[in-house]
Image (cartoon, rainbow, N blue to C red):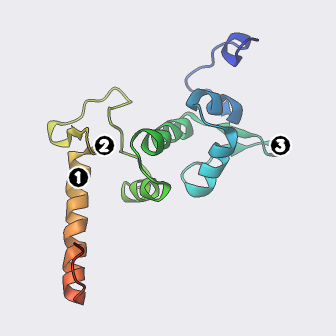
C-alpha cells in the first residue's frame, strides 16, 4: 500500500491542504482537528461545497503550534486558548523557532518551563497582580 505522498506529487508550500493531508502530517485524527476548530476561533479553514475543509499555510502553522503546546509542552486547551488571546492571535509557545528566526537573548527559552523569558515575565506580572487582589479581598494564601 502506497502512502499519500507516494501517490501524489509534492505540493507547494503555499498550497491548500485537505483535512486528511493535515491530519496525516500532524499525526492527529481528523476528528481532533475538527474539535480544535470549535475550541480555537483562530483556526478558520476554507470550506467548499459539501463542507470539505481546505487549510491555508497559516492555518497549518497554527495547528502545528497548537499540537506542540498540547502534546509536547503539556498545556491544556484552556492554557493554549489563553496564550492565543494574550498574544493577539499569534501563538508564541514554541520551544525552538520554527520560522528560522533567532530568539533574542532576553527571550531565551526556558526548556524546563517551555516559556520564553518574555512570557515568563508576563506570567509573573499577572501572578503578582492576582496576589494583590487576593490580599485586598482578604483571602488567605494556599499552603
In this rendering, is residue 67 above or below 82? above
Residue 114 is tagged as: 2
Helix, strand or loop status at disc 1: helix
Q: Residues within 10 Å of mark 2 (few under 14, many from 20)?
A: some
**Spot occupied by residue 136 in the image (x, y as percentages of width and height):** 20, 87
Indicate whether 75 appears above or below 78.
above
List the residue tagged with mark 3. 49
The residue singled out by tag 1 in the image is 120
Q: Does residue 16 show up?
A: no
Quadrant assignment, res 82:
bottom left
Q: In x, y percent, where is residue 139?
A: 25, 85
User: Label 2, label 1: how many angstroms apart (C-alpha)?
Assistant: 9 Å
Query: Which comes before the other along the chain, label 2 or label 3?
Result: 3
Q: Is residue 3 visible?
A: yes
Q: Quadrant of the N terminus?
A: top right
Q: Which label sits in the foreground, 3 or 1?
A: 1
- Mark 1 and mark 2 in contact (Cβ < 8 Å)? no
Sequence-wise, the earlier of marks 3 and 1 is 3
Q: Residue at 24% of width from left, 88% of height from top? A: 137
> Mark 3 to mark 1: distance in Å?
44 Å
Give the CA distance from mark 2 to mark 3: 40 Å
Q: Tell me which residue sits at (36%, 45%) in the image.
A: 92
CB under 8 Å between discs 2 and 3: no
Amino acid at each position: 500500500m502506497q502512502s499519500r505522498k507516494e501517490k501524489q506529487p509534492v505540493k507547494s508550500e503555499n498550497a491548500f491542504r485537505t483535512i486528511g493531508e493535515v491530519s496525516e502530517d500532524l499525526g492527529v485524527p481528523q476528528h481532533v482537528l475538527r474539535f480544535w476548530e470549535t475550541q480555537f476561533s483562530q483556526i478558520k479553514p476554507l470550506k467548499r461545497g459539501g463542507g470539505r475543509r481546505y487549510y491555508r499555510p497559516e492555518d497549518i502553522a497554527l495547528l502545528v503550534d497548537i499540537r506542540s503546546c498540547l502534546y509536547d509542552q503539556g498545556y491544556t486547551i484552556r492554557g493554549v486558548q489563553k496564550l492565543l488571546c494574550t498574544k493577539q492571535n499569534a501563538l508564541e509557545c514554541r520551544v525552538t523557532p520554527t520560522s528560522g528566526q533567532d530568539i533574542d537573548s532576553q527571550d531565551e527559552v526556558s526548556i524546563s518551563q517551555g516559556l520564553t523569558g518574555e512570557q515568563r515575565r508576563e506570567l509573573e506580572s499577572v501572578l503578582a497582580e492576582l496576589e494583590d487582589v487576593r490580599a485586598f479581598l482578604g483571602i488567605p494564601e494556599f499552603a
